[in-house]
Amino acid sequence: MSNIDAAKIAKLARIALTQEEQAKFQAQLSDIIGFVSQLQEVDVSGVEPTAQVTGLEDVLRSDVVEACDEDTRKKLRAQFPARKDDLLQVPAVFE
């Protein structure tokens, strides 16, 4: 891999590199590409593709709106530190 290739990859990744870092990463990228080339030579015919092998499954649940009575709502609103009318104010997440 040439210096131009390492510089181009750094630019695509939006990483500013010094000449010293560029030389270091050039060597590392060359090694990585060499390992990938070795992997391409491995015979994987008959091997079933897998994304993961642990058998874990997503355990997300659906959001369900549960109604409550007006008395419960009033108690909740009364305990909330920042309110405006019937709305509850929370700290901003985004600027």
Image (cartoon, rainbow, N blue to C red):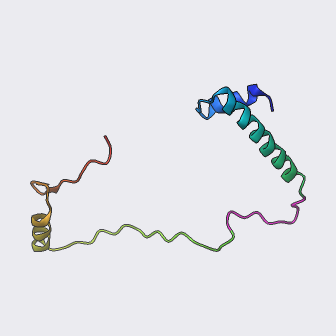
In the image, what residue occupies the spot 68% across and 30% down? 20
Residue 57, position in %: x, y? 57, 71
Residue 73, position in %: x, y? 14, 69
In the image, what residue occupies the spot 32% across and 44% down? 94
**In the rendered view, would you say 75 is above or below 40?**
below
Residue 69, position in %: x, y? 14, 74
Q: Can the viewer see residue 95?
A: yes
Relative to 2, 45 lies left or right: right
Quarter of the view holding residue 67: bottom left
In the image, what residue occupies the spot 43% across and 70% down? 61
Q: What span is in magenta?
A: 43-52
Magenta-drawn stretch contains 95: no
Of the pair 29 and 79, the residue shown nearer to us = 29
> Which quarter of the image is occupied by the N terminus?
top right
Q: Can the viewer see residue 8?
A: no
Relative to 48, 42 lies left or right: right
Residue 35, position in %: x, y? 82, 49
**In the rendered view, would you say 85 is above or below 12?**
below
Of the pair 26 and 87, the residue shown nearer to us = 26
Of the pair 8 and 27, the residue shown nearer to us = 27
Magenta-drawn stretch contains 44: yes
> Which quarter of the image is occupied by the C terminus?
top left
Relative to 81, 6 lies left or right: right
The residue most toward the front is 20
Main SS of the magenta part reads: loop
Of the pair 41 and 51, the residue shown nearer to us = 41
In the image, what residue occupies the spot 83% across and 65% down? 47
**In the rendered view, would you say 6 is above or below 82?**
above
Question: Exactly how many numbered labels are in the figure?
Answer: 0
